[in-house]
Image (tube, rainbow, N blue to C red):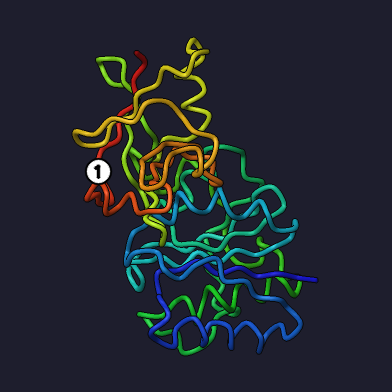
Amino acid sequence: MSVITILSDFGAHDEYVGVMKGVIFSICPSVSIVDITHQIDPQDIAQAAYLIPSSYRFFPEGTVHLIVVDPGVGSERDILAVNHGGHFFIAPDNGVLTLLMNREKSDTIVRVRNADYYIKPVSPTFHGRDIFAAIGAHIVNGTGLEELGTKTDIEDLVHLEELNCRLSETGELVGKIISIDRFGNLITNIDSNSLTNFRKNDPKNRLQIRISTHVIAGLSETYANADPSSPLALIGSRNHLEIAVNDGSAERHFKAHKGDAVRVRLL
């Protein structure tokens, strides 16, 4: 079974996602399509960049992943077709693949140039339909990446700066809220590997997690480890540090917003 996934900022109000699926089925009727999410905040390239590495690896090799968070649609920005660990990614060259390709070497990176595989006429405002969906379906049908355009190197791509957490001059691990899920959990860009390295000399769980003026002591294993309506911090399913409230909303509890700083220190 062949699979195409779609991740976008289109939401569910308009016809955009449905029409993309129509293009895909017209070219490759037997493919299965999976919606990762269409609730990326509008034009939020960084939010999408964090989600890609935590989602694609649960799909079988050969899956084609369409990443349509593309505020530069119709401009001079390029469209990329990437073979990464046996998975294929179609995405704008705007930095959205930064975290994915920083972690492992990609096998092939192509700048899409061959208009023979587009839906025509190409709308300057809807490349998701006319290029991304069409290209993805053709890859499922066996089109090689080299047929789509010209090879390029990772060093020549757009990279987003400051996506990762960092160590401050005072020895704190500093990150920020990158996403707030529908439960009100605050998902940060402090990944589990960075946190493990930071606390390698901390066998007694003496961490302090700070958000604004609030302090959470230590890490919990589950949401239920805290009393009802009490805040906690834990490593969530995306392998990133989350701040949550048991049976409540950390977003409301802390009056938090995406982009707010989160600091971790050792006592």
- 58 or 248: which is nearer to us? 248
Q: Confirm whether residue 159 shows in the render.
A: no
**Above or below, comparing residue 245 to residue 33 in the picture:** above
Q: Confirm whether residue 62 shows in the render.
A: yes
Based on the displayed image, in which of its 4 quarters is residue 174 positioned? Answer: top left
- 195 or 96: which is nearer to us? 195
Q: Residue furthest front?
A: 227
Q: Residue furthest top?
A: 201
Relative image position of residue 202 (x, y in whole percent): 48, 13
Relative image position of residue 171 (x, y in whole percent): 31, 15
Mark 1 is on which residue type?
Answer: Asp
Horizontal arrangement in the rendering, residue 77 relative to residue 210 (left or right): right
* Residue occupying the point 47% across, 64% down: 79
Q: Quadrant of the N terminus?
A: bottom right
**Above or below, comparing residue 30 to residue 62 in the picture:** below
Based on the displayed image, in which of its 4 quarters is residue 211 positioned? Answer: top left
* Residue occupying the point 22% across, 50% down: 255
- 75 or 176: which is nearer to us? 176
Relative image position of residue 123 (x, y in whole percent): 40, 84
Can you identify the residue that label 1 sits on? Answer: 260
